[in-house]
Image: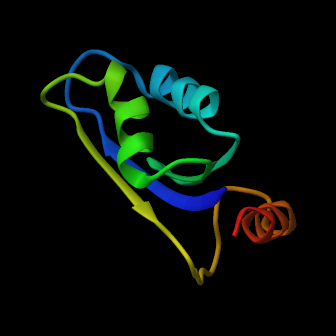
């Protein structure tokens, strides 16, 4: 498993943010919303493989970034701090 940061901008009528969030949760082994449209994802494959899994529901006007993350620092996040730190280290 590896840690990835996923960020997206939804610019069309579909998918909705709720649909995209559900899709992220479906694709990922473990995940959590870090910021409004930024997710941490634990995934078994490469960044390109994760991108390909996530983009299947996106429209041509939507934007997506998937980056493998080996280290991170933050102040506050939307996820539970202790649970996130534990999950981050488990996936690293």
Give percent across and percent down for residue 74.
60, 80
Give percent across and percent down for residue 79.
71, 56
Q: Which residue appears at 66% of the width and 46% of the height?
A: 31
Q: Which residue appears at 48% of the width and 59% of the height?
A: 5
Residue at the farthest left position: 61
Pick whichever, 88 or 33, lies toward us.
88
Pick whichever, 18 or 53, lies toward us.
53
Q: Quadrant of residue 61?
A: top left
Asked if residue 91 is positioned above or below residue 61 in the image, the reply reads below
Left or right: 39 in relation to 11 = right
Asked if residue 12 is positioned above or below residue 71 in the image, the reply reads above
Asked if residue 43 is positioned above or below residue 69 in the image, the reply reads above
Q: Which residue appears at 40% of the width and 62% of the height?
A: 67
Pick whichever, 83 or 17, lies toward us.
83
Residue at the farthest front position: 45
Q: In which quadrant is the N terminus drawn? A: bottom right
Q: In which quadrant is the C terminus drawn? A: bottom right
Q: Quadrant of residue 71?
A: bottom right
Give percent across and percent down for residue 68.
46, 65
Pick whichever, 90 or 23, lies toward us.
90
Number of numbered markers: 0
Give percent across and percent down for residue 55.
33, 30
Asked if residue 33 is positioned above or below residue 82 in the image, the reply reads above
Colour scheme of this structure image?
rainbow
């Amino acid at each position: 498993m590896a840690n990835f940061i996923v960020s997206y901008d939804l610019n069309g009528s579909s998918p909705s943010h709720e649909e995209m969030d559900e899709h992220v949760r479906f694709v990922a082994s473990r995940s959590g919303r870090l910021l409004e449209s930024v997710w941490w994802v634990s995934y078994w494959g490469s960044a390109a493989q994760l991108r390909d899994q996530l983009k299947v529901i996106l429209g041509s006007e939507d934007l997506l970034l998937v980056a493998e993350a080996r280290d991170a620092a933050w102040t506050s996040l939307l996820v539970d701090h202790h649970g996130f730190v534990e999950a981050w280290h488990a996936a690293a």
